[in-house]
């Protein structure tokens, strides 16, 4: 879907923002770029839609160099969500969402239907919100509009540059949950920039850890968490103790799901004495997994619940050492 081939970006003063990037992003993948400030993650994101022009190398979308696309067509086919939201204050919510469809000469009826469909997708009643101005919405609601505005013209790719970092923790967590549900429904390729490892572990199918303009490690949340490539990654994500037993945190990681949800596949069970690493390996084959203790199923876990627990544990450990 998206391929970086020896991509570098050097500014006129000589600073290298990114150096020799080589990686692929799969179609339909939620790919997270993460690292400390100044590591090159936002520059990498902006190279995809040519908000920054690369210095050397090539970026391909569907096998075609991005330099060979008409710049307007390229950007119309790539949704972009900013941290600052950047809704037009003088325009209604409907008008904000309709910007790109109007540029693409969609009919008014088609645009109206698309606006209503997208508002419903994020739980905002069209009749209530369509004619409101951005200032009449909460920060979380405005960011929802920012997300669906990026979806308005049905682009293949969505770029998201720290879209939730300015929100309060409760709104941020709610929008993360909403985005996870939205991801399953819209089946888009999403490239997401964050500096928050908990957010990356929660949302990403794969995570690209960057340092000083270079890629340090690319892997699934499990791989990043349990097999960090070096001390930088290990310190960045926090010590997760791969040998931690399920029994040590089972009450927190358990999901309240009826047992019948796993009855279709009775083999999808694991002892509570198993390690986190063992559980994650089994969860790569199953959506949910029954946890057994003393011959009884005490509940079920999911890949997401385990990863989220580890992320929260990392955050708690960071506060203790901060």
Image (spheres, rainbow, N blue to C red):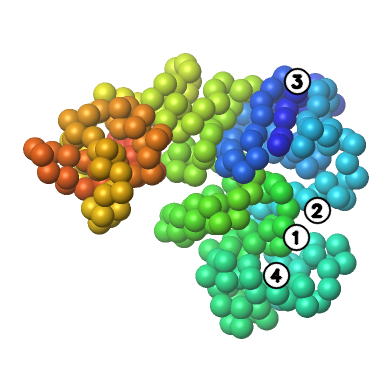
- Using a 10 Å C-alpha cutoff, classify the residue at mark 1 as few (fewer than 14 neighbours), some (14 to 19) or many (20 or more): many
Instruction: Assign the C terminus to one quadrant of the image.
Output: top left
Element type at mark 4: helix
Q: Earlier in the sequence, mark 2 or mark 3?
A: 3
Residue 76 shows which numbered tag? 2
Q: Is residue 308 in view?
A: no
Residue 153 shows which numbered tag? 1
Q: Earlier in the sequence, mark 2 or mark 4?
A: 2
- The residue lying toward the viewer, choosing from 212 and 79, is 79
Q: Earlier in the sequence, mark 4 or mark 3?
A: 3
Q: Position of residue 49 (x, y in %)?
A: 78, 42
Element type at mark 1: loop
Residue identifier under label 4: 114
Q: Is residue 105 in view?
A: yes
Q: Is residue 115 above or below residue 173?
A: below
Residue 6 shows which numbered tag? 3
Q: Earlier in the sequence, mark 1 or mark 2?
A: 2
**Disc 1 and disc 2: Cα gap in Å?**
7 Å
Q: Are marks 1 and 2 in contact (CB under 8 Å)?
A: yes
**Disc 3 and disc 1: Cα gap in Å?**
31 Å
Q: Are marks 2 and 4 in contact (CB under 8 Å)?
A: no
């Amino acid at each position: 879907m998206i391929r970086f081939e020896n991509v570098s970006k050097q500014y006129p003063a000589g600073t290298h923002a990114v150096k020799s990037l080589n990686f692929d992003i799969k179609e339909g993948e939620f790919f997270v770029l993460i690292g400390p400030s100044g590591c090159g993650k936002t520059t990498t994101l902006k190279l995809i839609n040519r908000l920054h022009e690369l210095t050397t190398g090539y970026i391909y979308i569907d096998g075609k160099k991005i330099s060979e696309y008409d710049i307007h067509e390229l950007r119309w086919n790539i949704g972009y969500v900013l941290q600052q939201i950047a809704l037009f204050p003088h325009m209604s919510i409907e008008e904000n969402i309709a910007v790109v469809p109007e540029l693409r000469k969609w009919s008014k009826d088609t645009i109206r239907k698309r606006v209503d469909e997208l508002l419903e997708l994020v739980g905002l009643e069209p009749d209530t919100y369509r004619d409101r101005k951005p200032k009449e919405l909460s920060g979380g609601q405005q960011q929802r509009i920012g997300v669906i505005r990026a979806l308005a013209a049905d682009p293949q790719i969505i770029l998201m540059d720290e879209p939730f970092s300015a929100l309060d923790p409760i709104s941020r967590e709610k929008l993360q949950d909403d985005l996870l549900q939205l991801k399953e429904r819209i089946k888009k390729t999403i490239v997401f920039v964050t500096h928050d490892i908990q957010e990356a572990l929660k949302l990403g199918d794969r995570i690209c850890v960057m340092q000083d303009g270079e890629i340090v490690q690319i892997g699934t949340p499990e791989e990043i968490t349990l097999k960090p490539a070096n001390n930088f990654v290990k310190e960045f994500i926090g010590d997760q103790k791969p040998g931690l037993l399920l029994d040590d945190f089972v009450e927190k990681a358990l999901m309240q799901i009826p047992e019948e949800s796993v009855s279709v596949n009775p083999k999808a069970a694991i002892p509570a004495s198993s390690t986190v690493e063992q559980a994650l390996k089994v969860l790569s084959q199953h959506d949910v997994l029954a946890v057994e203790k003393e011959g009884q199923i005490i509940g079920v876990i999911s890949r997401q619940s385990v990863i989220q627990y580890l992320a929260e544990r990392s955050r708690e450990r960071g506060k203790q050492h901060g």
